[in-house]
Image (cartoon, rainbow, N blue to C red):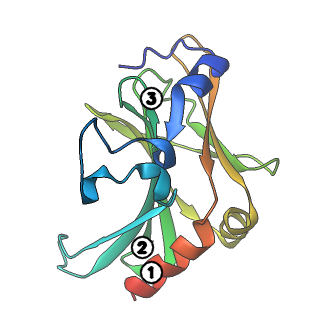
Amino acid sequence: MLDGALPVAVVTLCMITSTSVSAQTDGQKGPRAQTAATLPAWIVSCSNANSLGAFQCAMEQTLFVSASGQRLLSMKLVRNPSDRDQIVATLSLPHGILLDVGVTFWVDDGPKSVATISHADGSGSYATFPLDQKLSDALRKGKVFKVSAKSLDGEDFVFELSLEGFSATRDIMMRASS
């Protein structure tokens, strides 16, 4: 469990993106031997397992602690079921953060926004927000999506998600869930 007291440098050094997590163990062969380094940073998944039974797709990127495999941050984007033109983002955050200050996010060196942390459970804390056109355009053109939260000790820490392949993956998600 992340205790929330790690300084930014330590958190950054311990993190790796889903693109560099190895899916292979020693001696493993065949399709499962493929490493995640060959996979895109953003992954699309689709399912009809929802209350409407409708085919819905989502795109997601996850950061893990390299030593333990613990999830540090995940960003999932889905189409709003009641407004199919609207995309909603959910940030899955670790334990050990101050909930009442919310989470700050921005693209590259652009303007910062704050999202409310809506709830927490045994897996972490969650903030959900709509992607307006300005943020959507910034994500398509940007290099890094940054998320900042405060630890229980009041220290800021920043997670960075790669935006490499974001536009192409978003287009796939939108076409697949039309």
Looking at the rendered structure, the secondary structure element under dot 1 is strand
Counting residues from the start of the chain, the first of labels 2 and 3 encountered is: 3
Residue 155 is labelled as none
Which callout, 2 or 3, points to the residue nearer the camera? Answer: 3
**Residue corresponding to mark 1:** 83
Task: Give 156 or 1, whichever is nearer the viewer.
Answer: 1
11 versus 78 height, above or below: above
Q: CA distance from mark 1 to mark 2?
A: 5 Å
Q: Residue 82 location in percent, x, y?
A: 38, 79
- Left or right of residue 112: residue 119: left
Q: Are marks 1 and 2 in contact (CB under 8 Å)?
A: yes
- Left or right of residue 24: residue 104: right
130 versus 126 height, above or below: below
What amino acid type is highlighted by mark number 3?
Ser
Residue at (42% x, 30% y) in the render: 94
What amino acid type is highlighted by mark number 2?
Asn
Q: Are marks 2 and 3 in contact (CB under 8 Å)?
A: no
Looking at the rendered structure, the secondary structure element under dot 3 is loop
Q: Quadrant of residue 66?
A: top left
**Total labels drawn:** 3
82 versus 117 height, above or below: below
**Residue corresponding to mark 2:** 80
Residue at (60% x, 17% y) in the render: 10
Q: Residue 119 location in percent, x, y?
A: 36, 39
Which callout, 3 or 1, points to the residue nearer the camera? Answer: 3
**Residue corresponding to mark 3:** 66
Counting residues from the start of the chain, the first of labels 3 and 1 encountered is: 3
